[in-house]
Amino acid sequence: MAPVQGILQLMAIHHALAAPLFLALFLTLPEGGAVKAETIRLTLKNGDTINAELVPDESSEERKVVIHPQLGRLEVSRDAIRPEPTPPAWKSSISAGVIGNKKDGDDDVTATFAATSTYKKDGDKLSLKGGYNYNTTRDGNEPFKVQTNKGSATVRYDRRLSRGLSLVTLADYVYNGTNEASVNTVKGAIGLGVPLINTPSTQLTLSLGPSFQWGNGGSDCDTDSACGRTYPGASFTTELDWTPNPSFRISLDNNFSALAASELKPTNSFGATIKYFPSITSGMFTSLQFLSTYNSIAKPEIDNTVNGQVGIEF
């Protein structure tokens, strides 16, 4: 009966999580076959710019035909257009922060580190993320006590299958040395992704698919029924990157999973990062990061972290 119950649970999980993805797929389909006019920006070699609606049926690689609000129909040859600079395929960043505090004889020291690297070319996107957070405190002359000792590493690969669909694979490792159960947690998922928004300033992708989770380690692992076991499930992921202006960048990602154990076991991780670039040409930035984790098969179940860092993007 246990395998049958597990299969029925997985079917229920997929049914519940599939609704948002199918709705997103429906919303991305064109209505009634209508084609929305695309507004493009052309920069000419003499420095002038043209913002107009592209006429795709009359345009080619050699010339662009556009409809300008004031000038009307224009034909611009490729020789007159300034070539767009090719962005580098790899973009990376590293950041760190150290905070020390001494008050009334009590000591508090926090150190954080984060690194990201992203590869984008044609229909491929590879994202690598890692971070570490350490905090120790001391009351008076007592020995230092570790309050936070955790790190994480994430690998995500998106492969575009069509204009509105992509294949998504995800692997995530989390270490939390202060947990009583599931000090080490490994998650994996594969599924389909829908890019709801894909503009130079905003990218929003939803993905859904089967997943698994394994946890082990900790002083209570031997007595915890969930520790040391692998659970299948389903995962629903949201990823948002928004650049409201060149000086600010906001990244949000949320990963919700429902695991098929003896009873339904939900897990959720939410991360938010705000970066501020005082000079957009130097690559230096300051960042504020927030991470909230709920893991129903770990002890403790809830863990939140907020930190500030200084870093460089290259």
Image (tube, grey):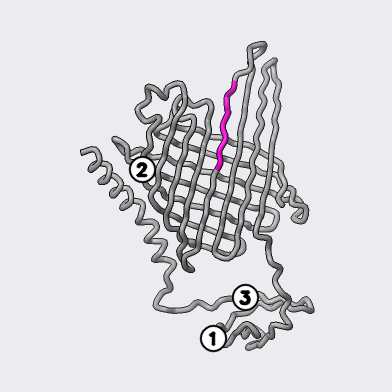
Q: In which quadrant of the rendered image does the N terminus lie?
A: top left
**Closer to us: 129 or 3:** 3
**Closer to us: 201 or 124:** 124
Q: Position of residue 39 (x, y in %)?
A: 59, 76
Give the side of residue 98 with respect to residue 66, left or right.
right
Which label number is shown at residue 21? none
Give the extent of the magenta segment: 146-153
- The residue drawn where x is 30% and y is 36% is 263
Q: Residues within 10 Å of mark 2 (few under 14, many from 20)?
A: many
Separation of marks 3 and 1 at Cα, in angstroms:
15 Å
Report the residue that reaches farthest toward the right: 46
Separation of marks 1 and 2 at Cα, in angstroms:
49 Å
Q: In this view, does 84 lie above or below 289?
A: below
Label 1 or label 2, whichever lies nearer to me, is 2
Q: Where is residue 192 in the image (x, y as percent from the top left)?
A: 43, 58
- 151 part of magenta stretch: yes
- The residue drawn where x is 56% and y is 83% is 56
Secondary element at tag 3: strand
Amino acid carrying mark 2 in the image? Pro
> In the rendered image, which quarter is residue 240 located in?
bottom right
Label whose residue precedes the other's in the sequence (3 or 1): 3
Which label number is shown at residue 57? 1
Q: Are marks 3 and 1 in contact (CB under 8 Å)?
A: no
Q: Mark 3 points at which residue?
A: 40
Q: In this view, does 38 lie above or below 67?
A: above
- 224 part of magenta stretch: no
